[in-house]
Amino acid sequence: MTSLLKDQPPRAAPAQPLPGAPPPPGRRPGWGDDEGGPRRDDSPMPGMATAQLGMLMFLAAEGMLFAGFIGAFLVFRFGNASWPPPMQPRLPVAVTGVNTAILLLSGYTMIRALRAAARRKPAQLRASIIATALLGILFLAVQGYEWVRLVSFGLTMASGIYGATFYTLIGTHGLHVVGAVTWLLIISLLLARSRFRPARRLPLELCGMYWFFVVGVWPLLYVLVYLH
Amino acid sequence: MNETAAVAHATHESPGFVRTYLFSTDHKMIAKQFLWLGLIMMLLGGLLALMVRWELAWPETQLPLMNLISEKTWEALNESGSWIARMIPNGFISPESYNSLFTMHATIMVFLVVMPILVGTFGNFLIPLQIGAPDMAFPVLNMLSFWTTALGGLVMLAGFFVPGGHAAGGWTAYAPLSAQAIYTGVNWGQHLWLISLFILGVGSLMGSINYITTVINMRARGMTWFRMPLTIWSLFITAVLLLFALPVLQAAAVLLLFDRTLGTSFYLPAGGGEPLLWQHLFWFFGHPEVYVLILPAMGIVCDILPVFSRKPIFGYKAMAVAMISIAFLGFIVWGHHMFISGMNPSLAVGFSITTILISVPAALITMNWIATLFRASIRFTTPMLFALGVVSMFIIGGLSGIFLGLAPTDIFLHDTYFVVAHFHYIVFGFSILGIFAGIYFWFPKMFGRKLNETLGKIHFLATFITFNLVFFPMHMLGIGGHMRRIYNPLQYPFLEPLQPMNVFITVSAFLLGASQILFMINFFWGLAGKKTWEQNPWEANTLEWTAAPPRPPHGNFLTPPIVHHGPYVYSLPGSTQDWAPQNEELPGKLARAAAG
Ligand code: HEM
Ligand SMILES: [Cu+2]
């Protein structure tokens, strides 16, 4: 405590309240930055940009949502003597393995996009973002095709606990990919209209965090749901 | 942001009615929006409780005042299939609607009263002000959080008007009771209940993300973690709890909704489902949730006691650590709600142990409160009285919790009125009394006006006494074998001797309800009263009292405050003034004493 006190800079006059006075205009230093920059004061905490921190919290909540679904899935997977239950269609392990590789590759292109933004290479940035979005769309397309086939083999939400857990878990992830791809498409649109100043990397970085989350949970789902 | 908007944002030139009162991004206005939502819902939730009580005291008799409506009108209502006729046919409570009444009473009280006020109002109002920030980290997200909650509330209310009536599976919505319409006769009511819960969860999560980020990143210069008021600690921990618990409830609700609408069988044994899965998911959320309902009130009490005992809080760091451990342990005790559910009995031992472990930090907090009060010259103001009420009620509610936390006693007490007594000592005796303490304490800061102290004290006495008259006898009822959630106790001969107690409780409950009229009078009278320019009426240390004027503008502080010491520097030996605001630099020797 005393050591903290010693760290204090020389102190300005205490803020004397003027009843009714309007606050001074403009951004005032000493608080978290609106743009998500790190704190500029002698913060007792290591600075992480406000927006990134918020995104991290959001992803923690997302993680718990998946944890809830995965927990339910595990109850059924390990609560049933045979899994998959007899008379149920088998899941496309190999095709989805390839699809997993596609998604992981999109994680790599996202890394490249972030690197390009950091090095201010707009052309590479645009190419990597579009590549990421296309890989995401490809992943969704393959999955959509597999879903259509599975439904035609009789695996549906209502066909039993196997189908229900499968569509809930994989569908939730799929919805997240749809959201992330939409976000990427908006960003690439902004980039094409060159409204996106490379100096303002923040939205890109947030999108990157979200994308890494979506890519990151997938291998876990693949192992749990497809491989047994 | 375009040019004009930027200027408007910077100077806050008369943003207009809509931007000031409806879609405000000022955390103080959003706090008030949550307060109004919560208070209005409290009225509704209380009304439902009184209807439940009426049924228990005088089963299958006509509700009061209903004889004023003529038989013809009832007939017309019945024929038109109106929602009133469904809820109270001919002015009587039917068995089906009784189930809806207690389900919705609890749902509304938990999700639309205590959470909006304790977390929404106090979280929004206090976090930026007490840590010395101009606003939340994400003001627009903050506004969305309120409107999402309001939408969730509307969806919840809509359930009263749909055919089949509102959800009737209890606020815990155990499957398979809640999973198929055939069991309760409720179809759309339960759908809407689940959808609303999901939306309310989204609103709360937005708030939590904001709170956590704000506390971590927006603290004023010098506001270190261990100089934060305990209210901020409690709200921060609450936000973390919500962040990790709510998504699990949402996942569970989605699965239940699928069972009801898409023909899945997650919770239906006939289709290979597992009813216990719902209980596990629900209580994984539910137990942290009960800490959500008390932690902010705990923090508020920690801040109010020192102000009116003019003493530092006893064991500041121990308090923060105790709250953290309560939150942590709160995630591994959920099984104590399921001792007789048919889960593996050896698990019950583990859950009993973790539950009893939680009482260690809880007891520590209570002891620290008592130590804070020990030999203090107490100022018995209204907020202090309510805070003292919380301390004493927590002792009773905590002790009854121990009997319920141990499987051997709980097997006997589960699903009896003993449980109802226990959780009302917590949710009313702790959360609601804590809410009142907070409202009386921060009203001058929120509205720039003062509440009447005398009326406030009468309100406290009336509430405190009638509350105990309502809920203490429920312990005896429960031990006597009175089950909860029954429509007519008189159908069991062994409960007949207990019926006078039911009547006594109901009469007291009506008095408890009537006592709240005193609060309403005080509240509206205060709002209409004249403005006060008194900036720090309670002579408190935390930063919100240094923000000027009494009702600070959007932006809160004229210049960023600098914090020099912790929030509980009261009656410092050698100091002429018995308090020291956190932004006031003390001379060398005193500063060392304050830091030590
Ligand atoms: C005037 C004050 C109140 C009265 C008279 C009252 C009365 C009751 C009654 C009679 C029940 C039903 C017991 C049964 O299941 O048979 C009940 C249940 C419940 N109440 Fe209250 N209550 C009050 C305030 C509150 C508050 C403020 C909260 C929450 C913050 C609350 C939360 C609950 C909960 C969670 C249940 C359990 C419902 C269930 O098991 O489905 N109550 N209350
Ligand atoms: Cu519990």
Image (tube, grey):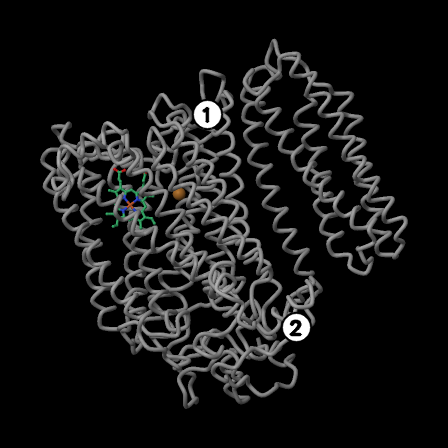
Residue under pointer 2: A27
Question: Is residue B134 toward the left or the right of residue A132 in the image?
Answer: left
Looking at this rendering, what residue extends furthest in the top direction? A87
Q: Looking at the picture, which amino acid does disc 2 mark?
A: Arg
For label 1, the SS is helix
* Closest to the observer, B34 or A63: B34
Q: Residue B260 bears which disc, if any? A: 1
Residue B436 vertical placement versus B158 (above, below): below
Q: Quadrant of ligand 1?
A: top left
Q: Residue at x 49, y 82 (%)?
A: B593
Q: Looking at the picture, which amino acid does disc 1 mark?
A: Arg
Q: Residue B100 bears which disc, if any? A: none
The crowd level at tag 1 (other Cα within 10 Å; few <14, some 14-19, many 20+) is many
Quarter of the picture containing the C terminus of chain A is top right
Q: Is mark 1 within 8 Å of ligand 1?
A: no
Do the residues at pointers 2 and 1 share their chain?
no
- Image quarter for residue B503? top left
Residue B213 vertical placement versus B413 (above, below): below
